[in-house]
Image: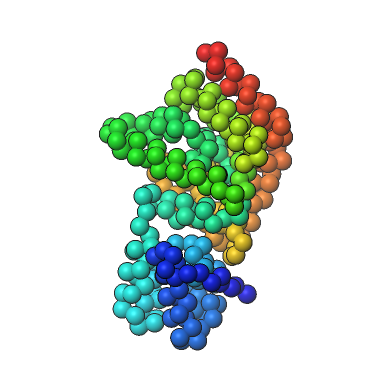
């Protein structure tokens, strides 16, 4: 049985959307489960919308407006709630990370955004957008730095990151920037703000070789997975697929170096960069 935590509807457009959806659902006497059947989504979607765990979706908002006979009321609220400084494909994932209880990252190619230094983020954005204006690059870097406030929150989600050894040995921004980046990750780990493991080259093939993946768990509602490639991303909420991702993550974690050995390796690689 899903349930909804009570929120102040005037906290944000997203909270107002959730309150309105709950009000309309109560007026027609439908449970979250029955409503989800009418608009062809899972009950978890309805619970997430009403409790502000997940941003509302335009397609489902249209179906809800049609069902409730509310014109474009929920669709307009949806557009307001979804205003974001992030690319549309990442907006939902960025929002979900702020309410997750645990974040499990697998990073086969790059340091995840939450752990990046400013220099590393700048070098990465410049590499992917070589013709962008400097102010556009700096804007993207600043938004990434602002996301990292999540790690300063005492109620932050628990963050566990698996880095492939190749990430350590790809010097985005040059040796000095990369040394600083590795020291930054080590510092976060030693201050008990994150847990990090390195998957060494010796581990060879594994089930997560294809790309970045993040498993997110929540106090309310089922877990979800965010997968990302160069210019796109998607949320996976199918329970069977999420279980597959969890199993794969556990296998990779078992093949990785221990947290202590991982930090020692990162410090050693950082020292090598410092001598470059």
Can see residue 50?
yes
Q: Is residue 175 left or right of residue 142?
A: right
Q: Can you give x and y, in whole percent of width and height, for residue 58 in the image?
A: 37, 66
| Front-lying residue, 37 or 121 | 121
Q: Residue sitting at 36 percent across and 77 percent down? A: 65
| Front-lying residue, 83 or 124 | 83
Can see residue 57?
no
Q: Residue sitting at 59 percent across and 52 percent down? A: 155
Q: Residue sitting at 52 percent across and 47 percent down? A: 150
| Front-lying residue, 239 or 159 | 159
User: How does the figure colour the protein chain or chains?
Assistant: rainbow
**Quarter holding residue 108:** top right
Question: Where is 210 relative to 275, above or below?
Answer: below
Q: Can you give x and y, in whole percent of width and height, for residue 143 in the image?
A: 40, 43
Q: Residue sitting at 35 percent across and 35 percent down? A: 138
Q: Is residue 265 left or right of residue 213?
A: right
């Amino acid at each position: 049985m899903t349930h909804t935590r009570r929120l102040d509807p005037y906290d944000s457009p997203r909270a107002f959307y959730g309150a309105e959806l709950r009000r309309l659902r109560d007026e027609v006497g439908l449970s979250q489960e029955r409503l989800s059947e009418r608009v062809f989504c899972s009950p978890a979607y309805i619970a997430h919308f009403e409790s502000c765990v997940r941003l509302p979706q335009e397609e489902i908002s249209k179906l809800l407006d049609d069902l409730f006979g509310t014109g474009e009321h929920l669709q307009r609220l949806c557009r307001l709630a979804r205003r974001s400084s992030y690319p549309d494909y990442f907006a939902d994932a960025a929002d979900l990370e702020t309410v997750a209880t645990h974040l499990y990252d697998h990073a086969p190619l790059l340091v995840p955004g939450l752990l990046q230094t400013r220099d590393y983020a700048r070098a990465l954005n410049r590499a992917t957008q070589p013709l962008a204006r400097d102010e556009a690059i700096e804007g993207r870097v600043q938004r990434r730095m602002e996301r990292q406030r999540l790690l300063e929150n005492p109620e932050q989600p628990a963050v566990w990151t698996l880095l492939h050894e190749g990430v350590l040995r790809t010097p985005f921004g040059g040796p000095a920037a990369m040394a600083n980046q590795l020291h930054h990750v080590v510092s976060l780990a030693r201050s008990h703000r994150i847990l990090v493991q390195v998957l060494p080259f010796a581990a060879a093939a594994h089930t997560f070789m294809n790309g970045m993946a993040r498993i997110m768990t929540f106090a309310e509602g089922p877990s979800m997975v965010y997968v990302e490639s160069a210019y796109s991303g998607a949320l996976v909420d199918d329970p069977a697929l999420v279980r597959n991702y969890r199993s794969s993550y556990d296998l990779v974690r078992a093949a990785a170096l221990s947290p202590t050995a991982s930090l020692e390796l990162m410090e050693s690689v950082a020292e090598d960069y410092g001598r470059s």
